Image (cartoon, helix red, strand yellow):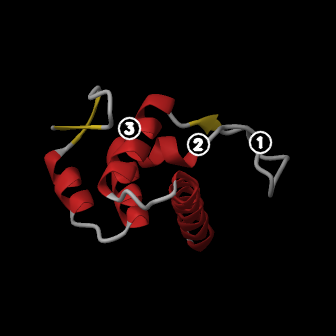
């Protein structure tokens, strides 16, 4: 296990860390770390800040991602890519979560 973030309390597997470090963009690194920090099940039920979907207000309320893990991810990406903007990394994280939901939805329609 490898500690990430500025406070050193969050860890990811060494495989996840090596894959994340090999990323050539901040968004790529964030996406790898996201999948290493959170299970797919958690990601499907969550979004960055929590709350109701803006696209489907009738859907279930989403839980916020663990703020400690999220901050460790953001700190790590910004430390690795000093020119990265935290807002862009956050957008990338939300984008990846939306992609996962879409993939699951598409598979359930096909089955």
> In terms of secondary structure, where does tag 3 sit?
helix
Q: Nearer the viewer, mark 2 or mark 3?
A: 3
Horizontally, is 17 left or right of 107 in the view?
Answer: left
Q: Position of residue 82 (x, y in %)?
A: 37, 56
Residue 38 visible: no
Q: Quadrant of the N terminus?
A: top left
Horizontally, is 83 left or right of 51 in the view?
Answer: left
- Give the residue at the far front of this rendering: 83
Horizontally, is 58 left or right of 27 in the view?
Answer: right
Q: Earlier in the sequence, mark 1 or mark 3?
A: 1
Please give the name of the residue rendered at 32% of the width and 33% of the height, measured from the top-left corner: 6
Q: Is residue 27 above or below residue 43?
A: below
Horizontally, is 68 left or right of 45 in the view?
Answer: left
Q: Position of residue 97 (x, y in %)?
A: 54, 56
Q: Earlier in the sequence, mark 2 or mark 3?
A: 2
Q: Which residue is mark 2?
A: 45
Q: Earlier in the sequence, mark 2 or mark 1?
A: 2
Q: Is residue 91 above or below residue 59?
A: below
Which of these two is toward me, 82 or 71? 82
> In terms of secondary structure, where does tag 2 sit?
loop
Give the Cα separation between the discs numbered 2 and 1: 11 Å
Give the Cα separation between the discs numbered 2 and 3: 20 Å
> In terms of secondary structure, where does tag 1 sit?
loop
User: Residue 4 — which label?
Assistant: none
Q: Residues within 10 Å of mark 1 (few under 14, many from 20)?
A: some
Q: Nearer the viewer, mark 1 or mark 3?
A: 3
| Location of residue 37 by image quarter | top left
Q: Nearer the viewer, mark 2 or mark 1?
A: 1
Q: Which residue is mark 3?
A: 72
| Total marks in image | 3
Please give the name of the residue rendered at 16% of the width and 53% of the height, measured from the top-left corner: 15
User: Residue 52 — which label?
Assistant: 1
């Amino acid at each position: 296990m490898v500690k990430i973030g500025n406070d050193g309390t969050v860890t990811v597997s060494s495989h996840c860390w090596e894959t994340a470090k090999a990323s050539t963009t901040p968004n790529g690194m964030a996406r790898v770390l996201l999948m290493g920090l959170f299970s797919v099940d958690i990601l499907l039920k969550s979004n960055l800040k929590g709350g109701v979907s803006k696209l489907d207000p009738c859907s279930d309320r989403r839980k916020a991602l663990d703020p400690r893990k999220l901050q460790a991810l953001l700190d790590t990406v910004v430390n690795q890519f000093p020119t990265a903007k935290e807002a862009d990394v956050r957008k990338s994280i939300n984008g990846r979560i939306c992609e996962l939901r879409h993939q699951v939805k598409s598979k359930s329609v096909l089955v």
